[in-house]
Image (cartoon, helix red, strand yellow):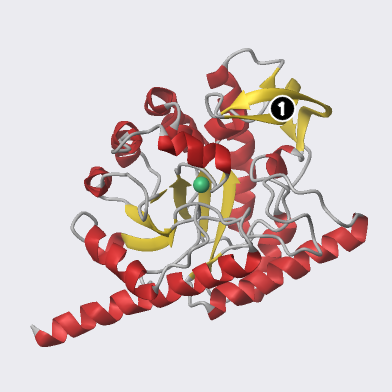
Amino acid sequence: MSRPLFSATLAGSLPKPSWLSETQKLWPEWKLQGDELAQAKADATLLWIKAQEDAGLDVIGDGEQSRQHFVHGFLEQVEGIDFDHKVKMGIRDNRYEAMVPQVVSELRLKGRVHATEARLLRKHTNRRIKFTLPGPMTIVDTVADGFYGDRVKLATAFAELLNQEALALQADGVDIIQFDEPAFNVYMKDAADWGVEVLERAAEGLTCTTAVHICYGYGIKANVDWKATLGEQWRQYEQVFPALAKSRIDQVSLECFHSHVPPELMALLAGKDVMVGVIDVASDEIETPEQVADTIEQVLRWVPRERLLPCTNCGLAPMNREVALKKLEALGLGAELARQRLRVAAESS
Ligand code: ZN
């Protein structure tokens, strides 16, 4: 594997510019329509590609500029889902309420979902590119089921559609396909019992690198309040990591900096690349490169250096754009500082 040590990347989403959509919202309304909207999405993607490169990130994403929300962006291209009659549903075990579309008949893809963004990304950066898709269990937790009547059946149906799109993304030149499964941290037993297996169905046949992102959510109030109830030690990962360690998924993205996750849980992921969250998405305070490098150093106790990939704790979509940009820069600088420290340590020993 010829990637630099401490290859830095993002969990996925970035804030949308104010000329593209509403800002600092999880489900922002677009400000344009039709061709103008398509052009504005592409423009926003390009500026974030440049910003990620300038920040020194090694793996570049599209910042999810073309989707309103990380789950519903995929669902919009799925036949069998009724977006006209959304219903209010408690999601993530009733942590918050959302207006969600309903599954009303057998699911099928209408066509390609993310071809435009993936090809744009491939064309405009020479670095490795990562594309994010919602994981099957998280999708099931973000729609109302009026047809399948069984969570595993519904998740498997989504996994098959995700697999079709993932194989096509791979053909578009995507190097890493990441599935976002925040639901794994909410339904830990289900995740271990069937969630990981269904996730593997979504990744079946992929020869590119595969990843899963598991987090404690965006830095929105409902999540911050929920985290306050989780106690001193957040051990949710403990139930899911052993199943993931046995799976064929190559990389796991997890929260670390400012979270109450005991870092020794990362040792449960032996054999996997670990995308370690070194940037807090629930605070506007900008990390210093020293803080980022310190987090990396601490984690080296549990994750071998060649498997440690510094990352953000979660997506940055609902954040202020300037804050997000500075956090990207801190991520890139912190990874570089961590590399420097290792070089100095090697020279002086
Ligand atoms: Zn996340």
Q: What is the three-letter code of the residue carrying label 1? A: Leu
Tell me which residue sits at (16%, 80%) in the image. Answer: 345
Q: Secondary structure at mark 1?
A: strand
Name the residue at the left extreme: 349
Name the residue at the bottom extreme: 347
Tell me which residue sits at (76%, 66%) in the image. Answer: 42
Cβ of mark 1 under 8 Å from ligand 1: the answer is no
Quarter occupied by the N terminus: bottom left
Q: How many marks?
A: 1
From the image, tell me which residue sits under label 1.
107
Neighbour tally class for label 1: few under 14, some 14-19, many 20 plus, Cα within 10 Å: some
Residue 204 in sight here: no
Q: From the viewer's perspective, is 340 left or right of 75?
A: left
Instruction: Judge whether 285 appears above or below 181 on screen.
Output: below
Instruction: Judge whether 33 appears above or below 231 on screen.
Output: below
Residue 101 location (% of width, % of height): 75, 28
Residue 270 location (% of width, % of height): 24, 48
Tell me which residue sits at (42%, 23%) in the image. Answer: 190
Quarter occupied by the C terminus: bottom left
